[in-house]
Structures are given as C-alpha cells and as structure tokens.
Amino acid sequence: MRRTGLALLIALAACARTAPAPRESEAMERSARILRQLDRLEAELHSGETGSFNYAELVRRHSATEQMTCKVADEHLADIHRLAMVQEARMARQQRGEPVRKHRTVAMARARFSRRATN
C-alpha cells in the first residue's frame, strides 16, 4: 500500500510540475524581428495603395482641367479671329473711301437676358 501511495504521489508530482519558462533564443528573436519588418512593409504597401489612388484621382482631374482649358482657349482664339476679321473689313472699307460708321461695337460673349419677369 505504501508503494502504491508513493508511486501515486510521484506520478502526481510529475504531472503537476510546471513547464520551464521558454528560453529566448537568437532564432526566435530573429523571427520576431522579421515579423515586425513584414508588418511595417505591409503597412507601407497599404499606404502606397492609397497614394496610388490619390495619384490616379489627381491625374483624372488634371486631364479634365486640361480639356476645359483647351476648350476655353479655342473659344477665345475664335473670338479674337472673328474680331480681327471685322477690323480688317473696316480698314479695307476705309481705304476704299467708303463711309465708316463712327459708333463703337462691343463684343459680347453671351447674350444679355433681362432680369425682369415677363408677363
């Protein structure tokens, strides 16, 4: 009986014994360092995707702005050309001795609308 009790006590002591604390090794430290670097790299990649999205949006806006600028410049050049043709015609009439109107003509970009309500 004593032997059984002693064997049972030894077995119980062996099972209840706590595992030793894991020992820090150089390989584990290197592995942890690599994992931290990978986390940083992943975070940089995610911010890079945001940056590329922002860059794509800027390119799109620039393209739209460039198109509007070209359209406005074309309209401006067409108006300049039209006014130059009017001026050349006047000068030609004046050189031929035809009477030239003395009133001034003002170029208007848009038709003027009345602000009053029409009934």
Image: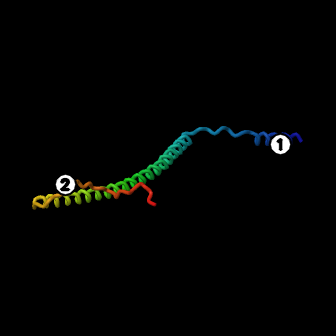
Q: How many marks?
A: 2
Q: CA distance from mark 2 to mark 1?
A: 128 Å
Q: Most extreme residue toward the left, as rendered?
A: 96
Label 2 crowd bin: few (<14), some (14–19), many (20+), radius 10 Å:
few
Camera-side mark, 2 or 1? 2
Query: In the rendered view, does 1 fall on the left or right side of 65?
Result: right
Residue drawn 52% across the image and 46% down it = 39
Above/below status of 82 relative to 18: below
Q: Quadrant of the N terminus?
A: top right
Q: Residue at x 19, y 60 (%)?
A: 85
Q: Which residue is mark 1?
A: 8
The reply to whether discs 2 and 1 touch (Cβ–Cβ < 8 Å) is no
Rendered residue at 27%/55% (across/down): 107
The residue at which mark 2 appears reads as: 102
Instruction: Look at the numbered disc 1 and give the secondary structure of its residue.
Output: helix
- Whichever of labels 2 and 1 marks the residue nearer the N terminus, that label is 1
Q: Residue furthest front?
A: 119
In the rendered view, would you say 14 is above or below 63? above
Q: Amino acid at mark 1?
A: Leu
In the image, is 99 to the left or to the right of 17? left
Picture coordinates of residue 45, whole percent (x, y):
47, 49
Report the front residue among 97 and 65: 97
- Front residue (pair 65, 16): 65
Residue 97, by quadrant, is: bottom left
Q: Nearer the viewer, residue 63 or 38?
A: 63
